[in-house]
Image: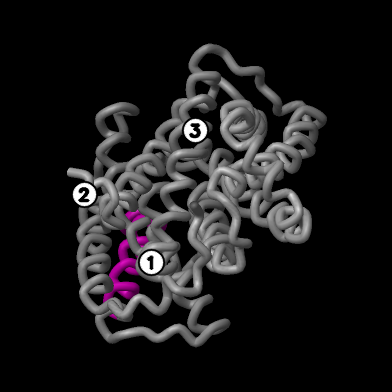
């Protein structure tokens, strides 16, 4: 049992489950709290939770943190604030099922960036897997009608999700440059950066007259996103990237639509269409092929500093 809960596949599967729940929480928050305020509340809760847990670590490692503070601040602003702000805004225009399936493009983004920037090796199985994943994403974004892509007549929310995927893919690649500090310090500093950078977004939302104070359901959604997708999943994700490298670890994001679709149907009551099933089939085939052909020598992971 201990081996299972410390296995990278198990760790990354839990990450995918919690991130699938993130889309559901965002959808349940619609009409109960505005997107930018949800983002602000998420990181405010996260910082409150992490402060007593990380204070000593941050104090001890402050010299290292201070040297890398601009970079860590940028990581938090991009990977935590910007991604989630766009994501929560997107689910007001598209379904939770679509949002989770479209996140499957993330491994392709990470692979392309790693190849272009670092010439990371790739196998034919990985190329086939990434291609199948991309087909699944396109089928979902086009709502089963690929002719829609030719006219670029995409749902506004679907387009936002794709932008968010590009942003988080960049964050994932940048994690390889994270300083070698305790995982509690890492999450706390990134969460603080996310809190700070979410304040102007919430203020802008209020100034435009779009802010909505949270009710009980809105606060519950914010608390869930803070604890599970915000803290637990981020901690496990960094650990997973450390253990098997960014290309292989990010491939498990393809499990997000599987969990997300099940949760959306069971909790939100969304309808599962035939094109969703087809897209999920492409996603499962893609992750299987790409993982089958992934390098096993451990070299990609060696470039990641391990959180302790």
Q: Where does the image place residue 237, in percent across and percent down from the top left?
A: 43, 52
Report the mark closest to the observer, 2 or 1: 2
Give, as a single range, the part of the protein colored magenta: 128-146
Q: Where does the image place residue 215, in percent across and percent down from the top left?
A: 56, 13
Q: Is residue 283 magenta?
A: no
**Residue at x 53% of width, y 76% of height:** 113
Q: Where does the image place residue 248, in percent across and percent down from the top left?
A: 35, 68
Residue 6 higher or lower than 306, as above or below: above
Report the mark closest to the observer, 1 or 3: 3
Label whose residue precedes the other's in the sequence (1 or 3) = 1
Q: Is residue 144 magenta?
A: yes
Q: Where does the image place residue 289, in percent across and percent down from the top left?
A: 22, 73
Question: How busy is the neighbourhood of tag 1: few (under 14 within 10 Å), some, or many (20 plus)?
Answer: few
Report the mark closest to the observer, 3 or 2: 2
**Residue at x 55% of width, y 68% of height:** 176
Label 3: which secondary element: helix
Label 2: which secondary element: helix
Tag 1 residue: 147
Q: Residue furthest left?
A: 1
Gap between marks 2 and 1 measured at Cα: 44 Å
Tag 2 residue: 4
Labelled pair 3, 2 in contact (Cβ < 8 Å): no
Asked if residue 271 lies left or right of residue 161, the reply is left
Gap between marks 3 and 2 measured at Cα: 25 Å
**Residue at x 28% of width, y 77% of height:** 296
Residue 221 higher or lower than 3, as above or below: above
On residue 225, the disc is 3
């Amino acid at each position: 049992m201990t081996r299972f809960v410390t296995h990278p596949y198990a760790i990354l599967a839990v990450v995918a489950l919690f991130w699938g729940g993130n889309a559901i929480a965002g959808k349940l928050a619609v009409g109960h709290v505005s997107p930018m305020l949800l983002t602000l509340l998420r990181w405010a809760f996260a910082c409150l939770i992490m402060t007593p847990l990380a204070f000593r670590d941050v104090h001890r490692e402050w010299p290292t943190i201070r040297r890398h503070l601009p970079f860590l601040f940028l990581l938090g602003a991009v990977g935590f604030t910007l991604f989630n702000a766009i994501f929560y805004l997107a689910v007001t225009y598209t379904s939770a099922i679509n949002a989770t399936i479209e996140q499957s493009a993330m491994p392709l983004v990470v692979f392309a960036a790693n190849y272009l920037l670092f010439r990371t090796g790739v196998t034919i199985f990985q190329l086939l897997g990434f291609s199948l994943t991309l087909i699944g994403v396109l089928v979902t974004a086009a709502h089963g009608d690929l002719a829609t892509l030719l006219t670029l007549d995409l749902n506004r929310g679907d387009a936002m999700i794709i932008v968010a995927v590009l942003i988080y893919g960049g964050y994932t690649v940048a994690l390889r440059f994270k300083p070698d500090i305790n995982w509690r310090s890492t999450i706390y500093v990134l969460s603080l950066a996310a809190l700070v950078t979410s304040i102007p977004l919430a203020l802008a939302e209020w100034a435009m007259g779009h802010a909505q104070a949270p009710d009980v359901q809105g606060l519950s959604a914010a608390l869930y996103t803070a604890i599970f997708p915000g803290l637990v999943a981020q901690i496990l994700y960094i650990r997973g990237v450390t253990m098997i490298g960014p290309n292989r670890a990010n491939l498990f994001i393809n499990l997000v639509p599987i969990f997300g679709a099940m949760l959306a149907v069971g909790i939100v009551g969304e309808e599962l269409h035939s094109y969703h099933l087809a897209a999920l089939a492409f996603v499962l085939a893609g992750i299987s092929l790409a993982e089958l052909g992934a390098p096993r020598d451990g070299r990609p992971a060696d470039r990641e500093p391990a959180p302790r």
